[in-house]
Image (tube, rainbow, N blue to C red):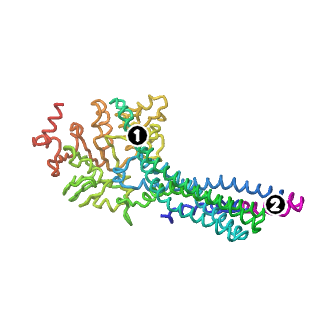
Amino acid sequence: MLKTFIGYYKNHQLLFYLDLLAATIMSGLNLLFPIITSNFIDNYIPNENTRLILTWGLILTGLYLIRMACNYFVNYYGHVMGTRIERDMRIDLYKKIQTLDNDYFDDHKTGSIMTYIVGHLRDISEMAHHTPENIFVSTIMILGSFSILIFIHVKFTLIVFVFIILLMIFSAFRRKKMMGASRKTRSTHEEINSEVENSIGGIRLTKAFTNEEFEIKKFTGVTNRYQNSYNEFYKQMGIFQAGTNLLIDLIYVVVLVFGGFFIIQGQLSAGEYVAYFMFIAYLIQPIRTLIGTIEQVQKGWSGYEKFYKIIQMNPKIKSPKNAMVLNGTAGLIEFKNVNFQYESSREDVLHNFNVTIEPGKKIALVGETGVGKSTISKLIPRFYDVNQGEILIDGKNVKDFDLYSLRSHIGHVQQDVYIFYGSIRDNILYGDPEATLDQVVDAAKKANIHNFIMSLPDQYETLVGERGVKLSGGQQQRVSIARVFLKNPPVLILDEATSSLDNVTEKLIQKALDELSEGRTTLVIAHRLSTISNSDEILVLSADGIKERGTHKELIKQDGYYSELYNASLQI
């Protein structure tokens, strides 16, 4: 995991090394000042050497101008490097999420995924910038200060370092407690983001059911858990910081007391005593920095663990090696002895299912809820993979095709249409992002929505609102149909595309769907049997498989289950 993290510095090596160089120069200049101060007190001032006092004053001024430039570089370009690493991680994470199976999204809340992409990576960015720099600079400062202190007085330095070792032991011991508390804050952070995303997304439903108080109560509960998790984290941080500050204060007391004894005994001069205090301050400062870095690492690393876990995921559904590219298809689809069950289910949704859909034919699936109609439509483009058996397109197993080329040949029109925030044009363009405006207009005309779009003030540039709230259900559905016209796939799946619409709108959309399915292999899933009467074949599904099959007229004549369903629908 650490190796993967370090790998993100590879594309920013120059900036990284320049940042460390600037930090090293700053550290070196810090170590120089106590030595010069000691010389001032012990030599230049007692000897009234004004020339060296002025000379070193000018030299220090120049050096501190250099230090200012280095400080600017570290604070500006160091953070730039951190944000670039954050950007790289965010892009990699988003790419990975795009490859994950539907199962992952079935099991994870949108708010949690958003937290991974946005919130956690901000802390990782800060850790990526500050941690290497702080460790490197602090190491130089500690080793440099220790070497000079040993040179000034060995025994004095060893006494001080006993307390420094105690400080390091205490820090290491408390670090584990802080890490556990930090992981808990991550979990509750994801929970509160999920609750906000879920609540805001359903705000209209909340208002319709006058459940504002209920939502406030839920949110208050999540917020309290969020606060409590941070209470525990800050408690551990408080113990950590209070303990380390006590040990640091004791170090100053040790320097004050033992330094006084050594001066009385003539083992230290006044200048060395002052220099010793300054070096101790310079020694304590990197220790404080490292302690602060530990806190930053707790937050950043717990976020990186979440990031790494997702990055290491391998989708179960992916293109095979030496995958075949589907360049056009006749549209022959076959299910052979297919068994399938969802991971969350113990029973097969489909069991030993067999059916052949001839090229260019329109096949309808009807039956009770839960018999696998929608599942069939999800198995063809490999949104899920069969447990047993195989699905063939033009005689070849769908698992042998390149996944992208397979799905690019299949168009979906679903009941639950997703409209992105943006313009109508952008939403239609989702069918083919490279299409021209003329092609978009042509697709809209075929979907019977062009005239409506032209009646809007901004026409195709009209913003549709969050999830298309400014459009009616029928208008949203026609936008989704226009997308598929633009995509122009040889295989079409219509999954209850008109079931939630009124009769007038349904007829408009059904006309567009009939035009869309012309000349394509079409699979229609429908509850409204009136919409499938012109299908080439209707399959009536039950929990045991295909119960009846035939044309509308043939099934009516059979006077079986389909006839019963159809007659019942006419009475509604």
Name the image quarter holding residue 569.
Answer: top left
**Do residues under tags 1 and 2 come within 8 Å of each other at their CB atoms?**
no
Residue 291 at what x, y percent from top left?
57, 58
Name the residue nearer the viewer: 220 or 106: 220
**CA separation, marks 1 and 2?**
76 Å
Q: Which residue is mark 2?
A: 41
Q: Secondary structure at mark 2?
A: helix
Left or right: residue 347 compared with residue 516? left
Name the image quarter holding residue 77.
Answer: bottom right
Mark closer to the chain start, 1 or 2 = 2
Point out which mark residue 419 bears.
1
The mark lying in front, picked from 1 and 2, is: 2
Name the residue nearer the viewer: 366 or 188: 188
Residue 43 at what x, y percent from top left?
84, 64
Q: Secondary structure at mark 1?
A: loop
Bounds of the magenta segment: 29-56
Left or right: residue 472 compared with residue 530? right
**Is 235 located above or below residue 441 in the figure?**
below
Left or right: residue 135 compared with residue 336? right
Name the image quarter holding residue 167.
Answer: bottom right
Q: Is residue 551 visible?
A: yes
Q: Amino acid at mark 1?
A: Ile
Point out which mark residue 479 bears.
none
Number of other residues with Cα within 10 Å of mark 2, as a class: few under 14, some 14 to 19, many 20 or more: some
Name the residue nearer the viewer: 246 or 511: 246
Q: Residue at x 69, y 53 (%)?
A: 72
Residue 369 at what x, y percent from top left?
21, 44
Q: Residue at x 21, y 36 (%)?
A: 530
Q: Is residue 15 visible?
A: no
Q: How many marks?
A: 2
For the C terminus, the image quarter is: top left
